[in-house]
Image: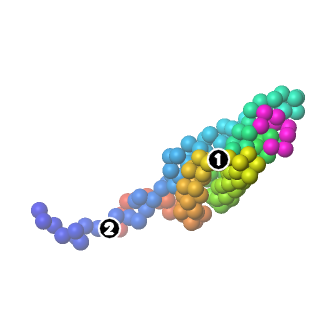
Amino acid sequence: MDQDASNFPNPPANLNKPQRRRQLLPWWVVGFVWIFMVFGALMPIAIIMGLLHFNFQLSLLGLTTDQPMSLIGGSLIFLFLFKGAIGLALWMERAWAVKLAKVDAIISGLVCIGVMVYVLYCDHSLSLRLELIAIIPYYLKMNSIQYDWENFDYEEATQPVVDLN
């Protein structure tokens, strides 16, 4: 039973190729995609409640407020809407979604760093933002899948694996 491996035909190149762009995303990114799609969908309600002078807590990336119609509140609502739109674009497999996700990661990282610097200089205390633990791998993952995502060919991915020749 000692057969030479060269006697066996090579498997088709698309045998392990994902059938959808969405399959390029790891499970933890899919989890965040769903979380931000839900929060993004809630933001129109938050805007209406804010216009009706209801106060409620908003917090993201170290920014916190209980006044949704303040500068920080508006910024947080915009960030939630932006992240929700990116989550939806990733879920709907738009070609430009990964590029925008990288922009989101950069903005999120800068906001976290800005909050840390603000707390350091204004409150004279050290605040480490744990969100950076998720933002950095998120950026690196989006960077690593960007080429495959943008050059994904659905026709090649869905061709039959069996070659009758």
Q: Earlier in the sequence, mark 1 or mark 2?
A: 2
Q: Residue at x 80, y 40 (%)?
A: 73
Numbered label attached to residue 10: 2
Numbered label attached to residue 127: 1
Indicate yes or no whether the magenta region holds residue 71: yes
Judged left or right of residue 151, residue 89 is right
Q: Residue at x 65, y 42 (%)?
A: 36
Residue farthest bottom in this picture = 6
Q: Name the colouring of the figure.
A: rainbow
Task: Give the class, few, some or many, for how many residues have Cα within 10 Å of label 1's Cα (few <14, many ≥20).
Answer: some
Q: Residue at x 88, y 29 (%)?
A: 52
Query: Could you tell me how far apart the alpha carbons at marks 1 and 2 are, in whole angstroms?
Result: 55 Å
Magenta range? 65-72
In depth, the one of 130 and 16 nearer the eye is 130
Q: Main secondary structure of the magenta part?
A: loop
Residue 84 image point, x, y percent? 69, 45
Residue 14 image-quadrant placement: bottom left
Task: Give the class, few, some or many, for how many residues have Cα within 10 Å of label 2's Cα (few <14, many ≥20).
Answer: few
Q: Helix or strand or loop: what does disc 1 sit on?
A: loop
Q: Quadrant of the C terminus?
A: bottom left
Residue farthest left in this picture = 1
